[in-house]
Image (cartoon, rainbow, N blue to C red):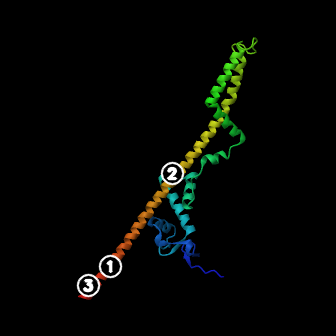
Amino acid sequence: MEKKRQKTVTCQIRQKQKIVSEVVPGYLLRESLVETIRKKYPEWSSEGFICNQDLNQIREGRIQDMLKEEMGELSNLESAVVKSLVEHELMSRDVNASFDRELTVGERLSDKVAEYGGSWRFIISFAGIFVVWIAINSGLLLSRSYDPYPFILLNLILSCLAAIQAPIIMMSQNRQESKDRLRSEYDYKINLKAELEIRNLHEKVDHLLTHQWQRMMEIQQMQIELMEEVVKRRS
């Protein structure tokens, strides 16, 4: 069965035929957006249509210009926020999951070592080892000790352990700083997008109120004219 042919209209920007679902009437656009379009396309009329692709590009350019006026030159981070806002993409994501997926086996091992080295299990277990070592080499359990006081071998083992453990913990801390920096970037992007969305929503509400007020005034004027006609007929 042949599909019904959809109605098409002309996009004033591209001068191409588009189906109705791919365009937006000019009178539905906010005044600030209409001014932006007319600056770039002076011949554009609000009585015509504009396709969604061109409208998104103009919105993206307008938001970038607005941010440049307030913040100066935009960074890649802010440009990504503007693009996601125009294309209605989600910004929220699980930073921990995305960061953990990029870790190597050595990095995961260093995180485990750092986690264990900063716990009470490490302190208690090493305290037990120290007590046993000192007891053995103090002659309490064996008549002949292999590391007598002042326990030079124990000091050597502890020094080697500290020399190995310190850079491992530093590597884990550096990755934690990278994760915190990534999390702060996502927080900034989400906050910036929320601020732009709220500002955009305020403009839409103002445009809707203005449009509804104009419609109400037109209806009121029509009612007054009808009442005047009724009065004239009765008189």
Task: Pick whichever, 113 or 39, lies toward us.
Answer: 113
Label drawn at residue 231: 3
Extreme-left residue of the structure: 235
Residue at horizontal 33 percent and vertical 77 percent from the top: 221
Mark 1 or 2, which is nearer the eye? Answer: 1
Q: Tell me the quadrant of the picture where the N terminus can be found.
A: bottom right
Residue type at tag 1: Gln
Mark 2 or 3, which is nearer the eye? Answer: 3
Mark 3 surroundings: few (<14), some (14-19) or many (≥20) residues within 10 A: few
Q: Which residue is mark 2?
A: 191
Q: How many marks?
A: 3
Residue at horizontal 61 percent and vertical 42 percent from the top: 178
Residue at horizontal 42 percent and vertical 66 percent from the top: 207
7 vs 170: above or below: below
2 vs 82: above or below: below
Q: Mark 1 or mark 2: name the one nearer the start of the chain.
A: 2
Q: Secondary structure at mark 1?
A: helix
Inspect this view and state whether residue 72 appears.
no
Residue type at tag 2: Asn
Would you identify the image quadrant in which residue 145 lies? top right
Extreme-front residue of the structure: 141
Residue type at tag 3: Val
Q: Mark 1 or mark 3: name the one nearer the start of the chain.
A: 1
Image coords of residue 189 (percent x, y): 54, 51
Mark 1 surroundings: few (<14), some (14-19) or many (≥20) residues within 10 A: few
Mark 2 surroundings: few (<14), some (14-19) or many (≥20) residues within 10 A: few
Q: Which residue is mark 1?
A: 223
Task: Pick whichever, 111 or 179, lies toward us.
Answer: 111
Q: Secondary structure at mark 3?
A: helix
